[in-house]
Image: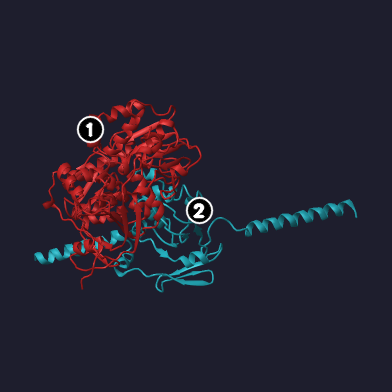
Amino acid sequence: MSFPQTFVEKFLSKKSGQKNLKAGTIVTVEPDHLLTHDNTAAIIGKISPELEEYGIVNKNLPLIVIDHIVPASTSKSALNHKKIREFVEKHGVKNFYDAGNGVCHQVVLEKGHALPGKLIVGSDSHTCSYGAMNVFSTGIDRTEAACLLLTGKLWLKIPETIKINLTGSLNEGVYAKDLILTIVGELTSSGASYKFLEFHGGKSLSISERFTLANMAVEMDGKGGVFPCDQTTKNYLKEKCDISSSEYEELWADEDAEYYDEYNFDLDKVVPMLAKPHKPDNVIPIEDYKEELLFDQFFLGTCTNGRLDDLKIAAEILEGKKIKKGCRMIVAPASKSILKKAMSEGYIEILLEAGAIITPPGCGPCLGGHMGVLAPEEKCLSTANRNFKGRMGCKESEIYLASPATVACSALYGKLVDPRKVLEN
Amino acid sequence: MSKKKILYGGLALAAVGVGSLAVYSFNKPTKKKRSTETKVWKYGNDINTDQLFPGKYTYTCSTLEEIKPHLLEDLDQDFAENVSEGDFLFAGKNFGCGSSREQPALGLKGVGIQAIVAKSFARIFYRASINQGLILIECPKAIDAFQEGDHVEIDLERSVIKVGEKEFEFPKLPKEILAIREAGGLLPYSRKLLKERQKNREKSEK
C-alpha cells in the first residue's frame, strides 16, 4: 500500500529493491561507495587473511583519500600511507587520491563521486556531508568498512526524519556556519539521534553553504542531512565535474510525508555565533558574549569551512592588514584545486602578507595530530566542526568554533569580534 | 605497681596494638578485585569519543595493546589502570557521541567490560559496539536507580538488568543484529557469510 514517504524511506526502499518501506525497517543494501582515508591501513589490517583469500568485492567500491596526516608526520603514519598505496596497487582500486589532493570529503565532492541517488558510507563521521548533493551518506566504523570491502553489503535501519524549514536569507556578516551553529544549538548534540535531517527551503544556498550545513548533521548525532537536487546541484555537477543530469537520479520526499519533528529557521534572524568549549552545541550569539576573549591561534580550514568562498571571505577581510602580533593563523585549503584557485585569485598572497601560515591541503590541525597543535592553556578560534576537549592535541587547551568571517576579523584583533562590526567599516 | 609490671603491661598493650593493626591490615579492602566483585564505572551525559579515546592517537594506536593504556585518558585517569574483566560502565544520555573511530568500542570490549548501560547511545558508537560484540543496554531507569555500591547483574535471555534489589527490562535487539552479536561481532559474521558464498559458488560450478 503506497503512502507519502520521506527521502530516506523512498531512497532506502528503492536501494533495497523494495517498495513502500517505513522508518524503523531494517534493510540490506549495497553501497555505491565506501570512503576511507588514512585509516584504510588499519581497516585492511583487520582482514589480511580474508583479502588474500577472497580479494575485494568490487574495484569501484572504495574511495580512498589520504588526508588526515599529510604529509606523513611520523614514520608510523608514513608506513600507514605506504600500506595503503600497496593495497591500492594490488587490488586495482580505481578511485585513489594520494596525499596532497585535499580533505577526503572535499575531494569526493570535487571529483564528482557525490551524485544524487548514490549511497555512500565512510569510515569518517563527516561522511554525512554529501547530503548537500542529494546523496544518502553516513559514517560507519572500521570493522564495518572492512567487512563491506569483502561482502559489499551493509544493514541499515531506515531512520525517522526531522524536517528543517529554512526561510528568508542570511544578512551581511552572517554565514552558513552561523546558521548551522544555531541549528545545532537548538537541537543539541543528541537532538537528531538516529534521525535523518531534511533541509527544505535552502534554494538560495550555494553548494559550499549546503556542504557546511550537511557536514554538521553528525554533531546532532544525526545519521545524515540531505538537500534536494535542484538547479544549483545540477549546475555544480555540469560546470565543476562535467557530469550531466542523465548520469544520476535525483530523489526527494513526497509532499505529505510524515516527519518525527519539524523546526523552522528564519535566516534573516540568524546572527554570528560562537560554540564555546567543549561541545559544538554550547553556542552563544557573539553579540551576547560580553567578556573579552583572547585567542592564541586562529584556524581556517576543514571539510566544514575550507573552501574557496571561505578563503575569499578571509582574504577580503585581511587585505592590506596584519593579524594581531603574538597570534598565529593557520589556513588549510580543503583541496589542491582550492589552493590553486586561491593562489591565482591572490587570496594566498594576501593571507601570507597578513601573517597566516598556509598548510598543505588536508585536515591540518583539526584533529590534533600536527600542523598547529595547541599548548596548555591556549585558546583557538576555529572554523572546524568539533571542539571536544583535547581535540587539537592538548586537553588543557580550549577550542571555540565560528564562521570564517568571525575567525578572520577576530585574528585582526587577537580576540573575539563580531564580524558585522568590522565589515560595516 | 612495680616498674617491671608497668613495663610488661606496656609491652603487652603494645603487642596487642600491633597485633590488632596486623589483623586489620590483613582484612582491609584492597584495590585488587576479588573474583565476585565487579566495579561500576559511572559517568554523566554526552560522553564523547575524544573522552573515550583521544583523537591524537587515532592513527598511532590500532591494536588492543596499544589502545588499552589510553582508554578514557582525558576523562578518568584511574580507568585504564584499574578496569577489570566483568566491570560495568554506566552513563547518561548520548554515550559515545562524536567520531566514528572504533578504538573506544574495541578497547572497552577488549578490557572485558561486561556491558555498557546508558540512558541512550550515539548511533555510530552503537553500531561500532555491535560490530565488536560489545553489549550495550539502553535502560534509563537502571541508571536513575543505581546507587554507589549496588550490585549489578544482567540476564540477556530475559532481557533484564538487576541493580541492587530492583529489576528493569530493556529492549531486545532486532534479529538481524542479534545474529551479528551472537556470531561474536561483524568480522566473524562476515567470515561465515563469505564461506557460505564460496560454497554456493562451488556447488553451482559443479
For the residues labelled 1 and 2, the Cα–Cα distance comes to 52 Å
Q: Decide which of A275, A235 is in the foreground and name it.
A: A235
Tell me where residue A169 appears, x and y as whole percent.
31, 47
Specify the chain shown as cyan.
Answer: B
Is any atom of residue B115 visible in this view? Answer: no
Q: Colour of chain A?
A: red
Q: Are marks 1 and 2 on the same chain?
A: no
Q: Amino acid at mark 2?
A: Asn
The chain ID associated with circle 2 is: B
Tell me where residue B12 appears, x and y as whole percent.
79, 56
Q: Decide which of B1, A176 is in the foreground and name it.
A: A176
Mark 1 residue crowding within 10 angstroms, few (<14) / some (14–19) / many (20+): some
Outermost residue, right side: B1
Q: Quadrant of the C terminus of chain A?
A: top left
Q: Is residue A108 rendered to the left or right of residue A242?
A: right
Outermost residue, left side: B206
Tell me where residue A243 appears, x and y as whole percent.
13, 47
Q: Quadrant of the N terminus of chain A?
A: bottom left
Q: Amino acid at mark 1?
A: Lys
The chain ID associated with circle 1 is: A
Q: Is residue A165 above or below residue A169?
A: below
Q: Decide which of A91, A297 is in the foreground and name it.
A: A297
Residue B82 tag number: 2
